[in-house]
Image (cartoon, helix red, strand yellow):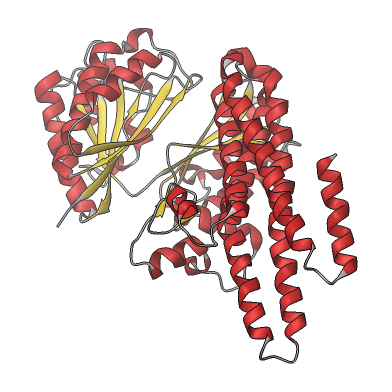
Amino acid sequence: MSTLVECVPNFSEGRNRSVVDAIVEAMKVPGVYLLDREMDADHNRCVITLVGDREAIAEAAIRGVGKASELIDLTSHQGAHPRIGAADVIPFIPIEGVIIEDCVAIARKVGQEIWKRFEIPVYLYEAAATTPERQNLENIRRGQFEVLREDIKTNPARRPDFGDPRCHPTAGATVVGARKALIAYNVFLNTTNVDIAKKIAKGIRFSSGGLRFVKAAGFEVRGLAQVSMNLTDFEQTPIARVFEFVRREAARYGVMPLSSEIVGLIPKAALEQAAEWFLQVENFDSSLILENRLAGVMSGKMAVGGLRAGAEPFIEQLAAPTATPGGGSASAAAAAMAAALGGMVAGMSRGKKAYAQYEPQLSQALARLAQLREELKTAIDADAESYTSVMTAYKQAKASSDGDALVESALHGATTVPLETAVRAREVSDIVKSLGPITNPNMASDLTVASALASAAIVGALANVEINLGSLKDATFAAEVRSRVAQLQR
């Protein structure tokens, strides 16, 4: 049986890309796959997400620690995030074919090897902890590197689980453990007053009487007050509840959330919970989500290319001698790619000092483009489904007394779907154009491509609207559609 373990090492470097590149390169082990890498200059920290077989993932983590110890010097390191090591924390998370106890065994093996190879002392935390006090990472990290390097010598409570009671001169100590999937979630407030963020963090974190499975602290990040959180069990304390708690606490001090961010990756189930929470969907379960239902029906066949579900890539489906997917789906796909490119440019400029003054606009653009991208991806299938509905209606009309009504209703849907695609594509186009003056000029070509894709999507979607208008008998609906088309064309 295959095994799959996730490892999310946090390294104390978020400003020097070449250092992070070298660490990632060192962790390239056969059977290990890089899922994500996040760098945060203010926290001066990077988060790498890897998955792989239990043996391979362990070796990758060990090599990453070794490379970090060569390149990161904590004696000159400064950042907003607490840390005790160059390789600060290395958690292992069970994904497939393993349980938490297996990850505990991996953590202990990795801890032993880190001391043996690099003479970096190791502490075990969470499920791998050897004492109750060390289950909480903040207890191990109290005082950070500067305090630990003295305490470790004389305080028995701070003796490491592996290694001698002394920190590595420049790499400090490392914390290794096993845990459930954790969500690193930060909320930016519309204030520069960090004291407010710290008060909110104190109110929300479990250790001071707040929500269970929430760890929180307040920092200044990118010139704003930030409530920085780790959600250690999103199934019991959903991310939506956390955001709502932060919002209500912020209101007490006359401020409000400006935006939020995910550091690393987030389980899909967590976002499903958030949708259920805020939309108040009755009798919700994950099988109501189109992609989840498709995955179940198709017995594990994957969504290909991140655009349209199916056994073949979307481009090959377009080339097939079938009516769907067609131009309407292609238009939605083009607009989705435009939104993705715009989001990429905004994301790579946000957080940089040169564009700090545009932080609110970039955050707003990122959030809206992400939403539009998902809506347009859904429209790819919706367009094909609307065509199928029209064909079905024509067949049913032959044996039905209200056949004309069936056809007219299906044509309404087939007209509305591409019209909404055009509306969203126009919004994407407008946002992309607004990014030009406030993002890195070296990425102008990416915005040019995004703009061209959005324009093509508008033209293509409206062509699909027009071809359906000719078959409609509802003059009022047709007039309303033509009015909206005219506005879009202007």
Name the foreground residue: 19 vs 255: 19
Residue 127 horizontal side relative to residue 358, left or right = left
Q: Quadrant of the N terminus?
A: bottom left
Name the foreground residue: 404 vs 242: 404
Residue 307 horizontal side relative to residue 457, left or right = left
Q: Residue at x 33, y 62 (%)?
A: 300
Q: Quadrant of residue 73?
A: top left
Query: Residue 23, how many percent across, how many down?
Result: 28, 21
Does residue 258 sit above or below 22 in this rendering? below
On the question of residue 421 being in view, the answer is yes
Does residue 100 sit above or below 167 in this rendering? below
Query: Residue 192, how many percent across, how many down?
Result: 68, 23
Does residue 232 sit above or below 148 in this rendering? below
Q: Residue at x 18, y 44 (%)?
A: 53
Residue with the most extreme front position = 321
Residue 45 horizontal side relative to residue 354, left or right = left
Query: Residue 158, how many percent across, how many down?
Result: 24, 28
Q: Residue at x 55, y 69 (%)?
A: 284
Q: Residue at x 76, y 37 (%)?
A: 254
On the question of residue 245 being in view, the answer is no
Q: Quadrant of the C terminus?
A: top right
Does residue 338 sit above or below 86 in this rendering? below
Q: Quadrant of residue 72?
A: top left
